[in-house]
Image (spheres, rainbow, N blue to C red):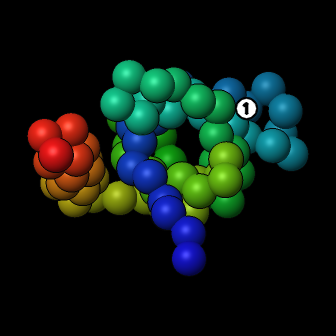
Amino acid sequence: MCLAVPGKIVSIDTSVPELKTAKVDFGGIVKHICVQWVDVQEGDYILAHAGMAISVLDEGEALQTLADFDAIARALESD
């Protein structure tokens, strides 16, 4: 089983044509993610796993997933 995490694309780097990457914001943590095989633009939400974007998400779906993650984290902190 794997976990894919939603994040928002902050910027896209095409300086290496064979490996398009993006800075992706995962709730305040920014990582460089390979976006070579998905059609994305700045502001899009993606699902990322192991440093690679695996799909583009609808903004509403992404925000709901992030809210669910936040609720889980708050529930775990209160235990």
In which image quadrant can residue 9 be found? top left
Q: Is residue 27 above or below residue 68?
A: above
Confirm whether residue 66 shows in the render. yes
Confirm whether residue 67 shows in the render. no
**Residue 10: x percent and y percent?**
46, 26
Which residue is farthest front? 79
- Could you say which is closer to the camera, residue 31 or residue 10? 31
Q: Is residue 30 above or below residue 54?
A: above
What residue is drawn where x is 67% and y is 47%?
51
**Residue 77: x percent and y percent?**
21, 38
**Residue 70: x percent and y percent?**
21, 43
- Given the image, on which type of amino acid does mark 1 rest? Thr
What residue is drawn where x is 56% and y is 77%?
1
**Residue 11: x percent and y percent?**
53, 25
Q: Secondary structure at mark 1?
A: loop
What residue is drawn where x is 34% and y is 30%?
27
Q: Residues within 10 Å of mark 1 (few under 14, many from 20)?
A: few
Q: Is residue 44 above or below residue 49?
A: above
Q: Is residue 23 left or right of residue 25?
A: right
- Could you say which is closer to the camera, residue 37 or residue 71? 71
- Could you say which is closer to the camera, residue 4 or residue 76? 76
What residue is drawn where x is 39% and y is 50%?
6
Instruction: Determine which residue is flagged by label 1.
Output: 14
Q: Is residue 70 left or right of residue 2?
A: left
How many circles with numbers are drawn on the protein? Answer: 1
Q: Is residue 43 left or right of residue 70?
A: right
